[in-house]
Image (spheres, grey):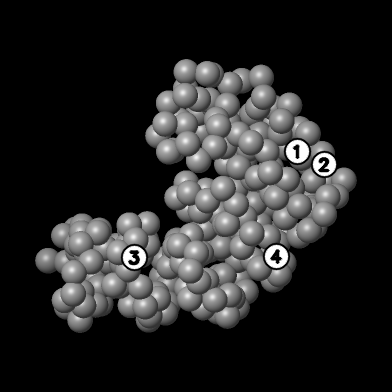
Amino acid sequence: MTTRWSTTVVASTKKALAAHGDPVRAEGAVSYMKNIAPFLGIAAPERRAFTKAAWKELPQPTSDDLGSAALALFALDEREYHYAACDLIEKFVASADEYFIAEYLEPLLMTKSWWDSVDALVNAGVSPLCRRYDASDIIDEWSSSDNIWLVRAAIGHQRGWKKDTDIKRVFEICDQHWDEKEFFIAKAIGWALRDITRLNPKAVHDFLQRHPSPNTVATREAQRGLDRFLT
């Protein structure tokens, strides 16, 4: 589904970014991101400055406007457009309704998936919307999925909640995947535990004590947090 708003966004974004690519930077980005997508070759600060100017006069979208535009940007080849979609969601996340996670964020998480886009979507949309709406059933579905990127999003769904973090809930999801050997899941567990060390380092310490079976990546990340906050 396309809307007038989403058509305007895509056109203005392409106009803002297409002429500013750097082939040398693009080649390096493609290599660093394991050929997940071609790149225009625009650094993040410049990309955000260009899109900020392009989007300055946009009216507030509906939830479907926002989701449609994000999907359309992800349908373009170059990775900077996918990053722009994440920035767009972050800018207009107040417009997203309770259905946005399932209708738009879930397919976006599974589109040209790599850690960069998945983490950006979690920060821009999944985390703030899970905080606003009860998305427990969706997070449970993601956590039980065979798709590693949905699992990673489930583990990180409370990223940035700080004192509002439901520590027990995060521990439950981390526990479910503790024996996973997949690097990107283990890394997400480690980051989630490390974040909680800022709130309750003893709880993280006790969690690790209850999980003597090795998860080297997750334990290393969690321990980095404990080294700073637990004396």
Q: Earlier in the sequence, mark 3 or mark 2?
A: 2
Q: Earlier in the sequence, mark 1 or mark 4?
A: 1
Looking at the rendered structure, which numbered label has been put on residue 86? Answer: none
User: As drawn, which residue projects farthest toward the right?
Assistant: 4
Q: Name the amino acid, label 3.
A: Ile
Measuring from the top left, give residue 56's x and y in whole percent. Answer: 73, 36
* Quadrant position of residue 184: bottom left
Q: Which residue is mark 3?
A: 189
Residue shown at 50%/40% (left/top)? Answer: 36
Q: Which residue is mark 1?
A: 10
Q: Earlier in the sequence, mark 4 or mark 2?
A: 2
Looking at the rendered structure, which numbered label has been put on residue 7? Answer: 2
Residue shown at 37%/78% (left/top)? Answer: 176
Q: Name the amino acid, label 4.
A: Glu
Q: Can I make out residue 67 in this image?
A: yes
C-alpha separation, residue under disc 4 versus residue under disc 3: 26 Å
Label 3: which secondary element: helix
Measuring from the top left, give residue 52's x and y in whole percent. Answer: 66, 35
Q: Earlier in the sequence, mark 1 or mark 3?
A: 1
